[in-house]
Amino acid sequence: MMILTIRTDKPEAEIGLFDDNKKLDYLIWEAHRNLSTDIHKKIKEILEKNNKSYKELRGIALYSGPGSFTGLRIGAAVANTMTDALNISIVGGGGLDWIETSIDKIQSGSSDKIVVPNYGASANTTKPKK
């Protein structure tokens, strides 16, 4: 079962490609302010590098937080949109073993349907200048 993992809660974004519990590939890159444009390229890159297609994906495991407001929001938007478009499962998770736990849930037929980020605190937004 082909599963994509996505983690976008910090400046270094991560995506992984797993066949069941076997890690096929894992990319970590300095995303910073380019996350929203780079994540799509990186997903395509990891699939092509491993001779896989979007149609082969059966689930997405998403790190849901806590972490960066903008990073988590971008990751959730990408993952939720992909799972809806591909009609596949999505599971959000946190903690050190989020990948293993999320993959196990997807393999057992579980799906969150949509993952809402857990920011860990209220968003720290700036006030308008006037």
Image (cartoon, rainbow, N blue to C red):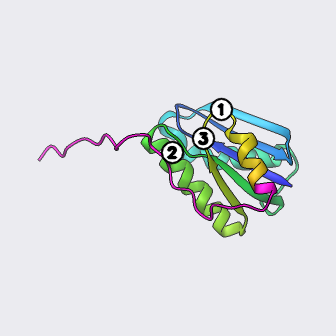
Using the rendered view, name the quadrant where residue 110 is placed.
Answer: bottom right
Q: Earlier in the sequence, mark 2 or mark 1?
A: 2
Report the magenta stretch's main SS: loop
Magenta-drawn stretch contains 114: yes
Kindly identify the amino acid type of the residue bearing the numbered disc 3.
Answer: Gly
Q: Is residue 6 left or right of residue 117?
A: right
Kindly identify which residue carries mark 1: 96
Give 31 or 81, whichever is nearer the viewer: 81
Using the numbered discs, state the Cα–Cα distance from disc 3 to disc 2 in whole angstroms: 12 Å
Kindly identify which residue carries mark 3: 94
- The residue carrying pointer 2 sits among few (fewer than 14), some (14 to 19) or many (20 or more) residues within 10 Å by Cα, namely many
Q: Is residue 114 left or right of residue 118?
A: right
Question: Percent x, y for residue 19?
Answer: 87, 47
Question: Percent x, y for residue 9?
Answer: 53, 38
Kindly identify the amino acid type of the residue bearing the numbered disc 2.
Answer: Leu
- Element under disc 2: helix
Question: In the rendered structure, which segment of residues is drawn in magenta?
Answer: 106-130
Kindly identify which residue carries mark 2: 72
Q: Nearer the viewer, mark 3 or mark 2?
A: 3
Q: Are marks 2 and 1 in contact (CB under 8 Å)?
A: no
Kindly identify the amino acid type of the residue bearing the numbered disc 1.
Answer: Leu
Question: Percent x, y for residue 119?
Answer: 44, 43
* Numbered label attached to residue 48: none
- The residue carrying pointer 3 sits among few (fewer than 14), some (14 to 19) or many (20 or more) residues within 10 Å by Cα, namely some
